[in-house]
Image: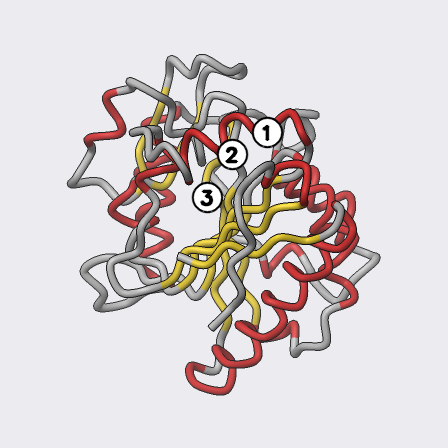
Amino acid sequence: MKIIVGKNKDDIFQKTINLIENVAKESIAKDNIFKIGLSGGSVATFLTIGIPKIKTDFTKWKLFFCDERNVPEDSNDSTYGFYKSALIGTSKLTEDHFIRIKQGVSAKEAAADYTEQLKRYFPGETVPKFHLLLLGMGPDGHTCSLFPNHPLLEETDEWIAAITDSPKPPSERITMTFKVVNNSKNCVFVVCGKEKAGIVKRILHNKEDLPASRVNPTSGEVYWMLDEEAAGDLQKINED
């Protein structure tokens, strides 16, 4: 685990963008492709500003979703819709770079279809190995659409699971399971603001069993990118 603390939100956002740029460069050099998983919320807001500034070969990027709401793409709740409106036309990314959920079907069908799409982009892999997953964290410690005390926390077979009773609306979503999350080469939490200091302490200091606490790649690295307000009393740990 690497905990990186920035002076403020802008500082930690820039550090995160630098990390993404470095991982993209290494991935393209090694694999001729960069496979990244995106999240919504505040993470999405800063990414739409920072991604266009990254020095990279965007033709080698494939962007997936760590979770997605089962809504039309033109809905205000659509994570893809948010990225589309902010990035397509303002960056070198096009619709073809995004791996989107199937429209007009149930969450269960959308999850099955997304699993099939992953199989095409991760051929021969028993579990997809993403180069990088960008993760958010809610005030209850949830990440992706994996919520505290929900049965999906214990899912060990599926890559992508449907959730129809999300405690946070909209209720129907699809989400990566821990089977996929913890097979990633890099998992990156970006958490800012003093309102997150309490949950950050519960996870990183008290080691409580919350969904975000379970992100621990088996053969990769997890980064906690925190501004000083979110870090609270945690001592800064420099990168190796």
Q: Residue 137 carries which label?
A: 2
Q: Which of marks 3 and 1 is in front?
A: 1
- Check disc 3 and give the amino acid type: Cys
Image coords of residue 28 (percent x, y): 51, 80
Mark 1 residue crowding within 10 angstroms, few (<14) / some (14–19) / many (20+): many
Which badge, 3 or 1, is on the more N-terminal residue?
Answer: 3
Query: Can you identify the residue that label 1 sits on?
Result: 196
The Cα atoms of the two marked residues, 2 and 1, are separated by 9 Å
The CA span between labels 2 and 3 is: 12 Å
Q: What residue type is labelled 1?
A: Lys
SS label for mark 2? loop
Choose mark 2 or mark 3, whichever is in front: 2
Residue 33, percent from left and from top: 49, 75
* Sequence-earlier tag: 2 or 1: 2
Image coloring type: secondary structure
Q: Mark 3 points at which residue?
A: 66
Mark 2 residue type: Met
Q: How many marks do you count on the picture?
A: 3
The residue positioned 34% from the left and 61% from the top of the image is: 120
Which mark lies nearer to you, 2 or 1?
Answer: 1
